[in-house]
Image (cartoon, helix red, strand yellow):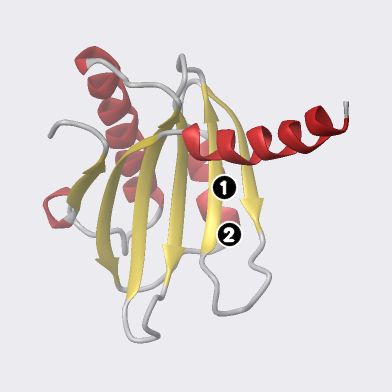
Amino acid sequence: MKMQLLILPLLAILSLGCNTWRSIDRTAPIASIPSRDTIERSLLAIPGVQRVQYCAPANPNDPLYYAIWYRTKNAAFSVVFRNPDKSQNVIDIQTGWFNHAPDAQEREVAREMMDEVYFTLKINCPDIPPHSDFRETTIGLPN
């Protein structure tokens, strides 16, 4: 019994490393960060968005982070405004999957949602850069 009590926590700790994360991230420099109210109103105007949650930074130097709840099978979306080196504001539009390998169709739907987020923000936030300025990177996915 004592051996089981020792093994179970060890197995639980080891299983934490079994989670996989796959993501699509689009990043671009931005002249200024829009107001929180403008960002939230813009994101809530996107068809299918169920909720927008602002995650306040614990430290003033941390990013401004918005989580977007949207109806997809396994995807999570976020919009992050940050100033990583205190010289250039950056916008990140991200989507990701935990423990799920999205097929080509799911990735395409996610990219379409990311486009919808971009175009809706662009309407209300004039400092959002042109779509062509965004650089897309992926983690754990084919390009």
- Measured in 3D between alpha carbons, the distance from the residue under mark 2 to the one under mark 1, in whole angstroms, is 6 Å
Q: Badge 2: how crowded within 10 Å, few (<14), some, or many (20+)?
A: few
Q: Are marks 2 and 1 in contact (CB under 8 Å)?
A: yes
The image quarter in which residue 110 lies? top left
Q: Secondary structure at mark 1?
A: helix
Q: Vertically, is 69 above or below 10?
A: above
* Residue closest to the eye, 98 or 127: 98
Q: Across the whole image, how many numbered discs are drawn on residues?
A: 2
Mark 1 crowdedness (10 Å alpha carbons): few <14, some 14-19, many ≥20: some
Image point (26%, 49%), residue name? 26
Q: Amino acid at mark 1?
A: Glu
* Residue positioned 32% across, 60% down in the render: 126
Counting from the top left corner in percent of width and height, residue 67 is at 55, 43
Pointer 1 residue: 40
Relative horizontal placement of residue 32, taking residue 136 as reference (left or right)? right
Q: Residue at x 39, y 76 (%)?
A: 84
Residue at image point 88% right, 25% down: 1
**Quadrant where the C terminus is found in the figure:** top left
- In this figure, which residue is indicated by the disc labeled 2? 36
Q: Position of residue 89 (x, y in %)?
A: 36, 73
